[in-house]
Image (spheres, helix red, strand yellow):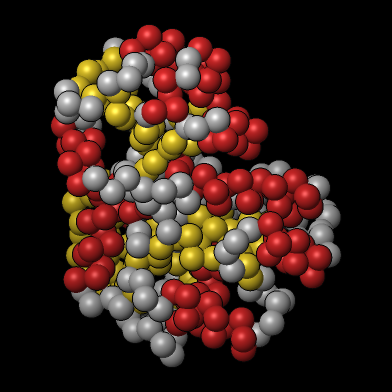
């Protein structure tokens, strides 16, 4: 456990904002968050906590098992919505209101004056989450941990933090091999390379922000396609592809159907860079993604997601579990990232 602790704390050391996202429900994301909070006590002070949205109910409606709660130490700064604040049992000092409102009330910043349990909820908009993280840092927080989201694709991206931890586990599938395949594929999608050209980044983040599908030509001119969603834009994109196209920026989801429509209809896509906001916008199966890349396609992100490591939970609340050592070792062979089991592995 000491090796595990030292390694994990070393990996997070250089980052001020870190999000924790889960492959699915019940993969141990909250356990990982509690682990980081507990092991930060003697190293990081003060610590800041917030959340992207709220991660469901207190009890899993399928398994009827209680979900782990988040336990914080005195001195921790917490940014959470008003309704969640009422569910927390810490003695607290209200530091400030943020003016950021959610369906569960305004996000309020408090300081824990005692150890205790907190309920986290926050905004689902990137710009609002960035403001909250920056506010916590301005208060003097040495590090801010964000209880993140992966499955809720419309929510704020984990790319708003400097680094991300991905949690996976047996609850993803009864097949260990399927869990490993899905985890490796998800890590690959989240880690797609980022676009480096400052002009293109500025263009996409500002000028093109209101348009769903954007074609950027080699000479710098731009064409906006009139697709209301990206899901059915394949034919329109194919019609507009030619040797003069440099980039296609898709604001929204990039799906299997869209890539298949393009692959089947033209070879012009091989000369073009497809841009998405970040890796969470890629709704692609491993088969289609690999086919696109192997045949010469390129996909880049405006906002990179830096996965520090993956945590694995061999137990499922659905009544089965994997051999913890086999699961850990197979994951380490399949994914080129550090893998930890924060409860068992040394």
Number of residue marks: 0
Q: Up-down: is 55 above or below 311?
A: above
Left or right: where 299 falls relative to 180:
left
Using the rendered view, name the quadrant where residue 154 is placed. top left
What is the x, y in percent for residue 160?
33, 54
Residue 262 visible here: yes
Image point (73%, 66%), residue name:
328
User: Would you place residue 323 above or below residue 233 in this image?
Assistant: below
Q: Is residue 57 above or below residue 3?
A: above
Q: Position of residue 211 (x, y in %)?
A: 25, 24
Q: Nearer the viewer, residue 149 or 325?
A: 325
Q: On the picture, is 195 further left or further right than 164?
A: left
Residue in the foreground of this view, choosing between 86 and 266: 266
View extreme (front): residue: 243
Q: What residue do we see at 19% from left, 22% from top?
A: 222
From the viewer's side, name the closer residue of 271 and 282.
271
Residue 28 visible (yes or no): no
**Which residue is rendered at x = 83% and y = 55% of the image?**
320
Quadrant showing the N terminus: bottom right
- Image quarter of the C terminus: bottom right
Q: Position of residue 200 (x, y in %)?
A: 22, 39
Which of the pair 104/263 is nearer the observer? 263
User: Taking 89 as reference, is 64 above or below it?
Assistant: above
Image x and y of residue 201, in percent: 23, 42
Residue at image coords 47%, 19%: 267
């Amino acid at each position: 456990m000491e090796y595990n602790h030292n390694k994990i704390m070393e990996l997070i050391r250089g980052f001020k904002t870190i999000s924790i996202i889960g492959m699915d429900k019940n993969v141990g994301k909250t356990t990982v968050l509690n682990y980081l909070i507990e092991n930060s006590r003697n190293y990081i002070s003060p610590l800041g906590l917030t959340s992207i949205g709220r991660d469901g109910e207190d009890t899993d409606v399928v398994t009827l098992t209680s979900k782990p709660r988040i336990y914080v130490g005195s001195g921790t700064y917490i940014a959470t919505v008003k309704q969640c604040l009422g569910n927390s049992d810490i003695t607290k000092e209200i530091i400030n209101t943020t003016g950021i409102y959610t369906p569960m009330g305004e996000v309020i910043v408090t300081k824990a004056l005692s150890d205790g349990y907190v309920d986290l909820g926050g905004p689902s908009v990137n710009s609002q989450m960035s403001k909250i993280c920056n506010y916590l840092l301005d208060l003097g927080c040495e590090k801010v941990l964000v209880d993140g989201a992966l499955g809720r694709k419309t929510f704020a991206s984990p790319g708003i933090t400097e680094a991300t931890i991905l949690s996976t586990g047996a609850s993803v599938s009864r097949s260990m091999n399927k869990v490993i395949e899905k985890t490796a594929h998800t890590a690959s999608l989240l880690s797609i390379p980022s676009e480096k050209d400052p002009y293109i980044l500025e263009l996409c983040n500002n000028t093109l922000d209101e348009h769903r599908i954007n074609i950027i030509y080699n000479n710098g001119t731009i064409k906006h396609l009139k697709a209301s969603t990206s899901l059915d834009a394949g034919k329109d994109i194919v019609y507009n592809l030619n040797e003069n196209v440099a980039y296609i920026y898709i604001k929204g989801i990039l799906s299997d159907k869209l890539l298949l429509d393009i692959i089947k209809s033209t070879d012009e896509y091989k000369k073009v860079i497809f841009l998405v906001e970040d890796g969470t916008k890629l709704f692609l199966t491993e088969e289609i993604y690999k086919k696109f890349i192997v045949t010469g396609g390129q996909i880049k992100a405006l906002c990179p997601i830096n996965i520090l490591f993956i945590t694995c939970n061999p137990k499922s609340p659905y009544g089965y579990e994997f051999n913890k050592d086999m699961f850990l070792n197979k994951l380490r062979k399949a994914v080129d990232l550090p893998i930890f089991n924060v409860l068992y592995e040394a």
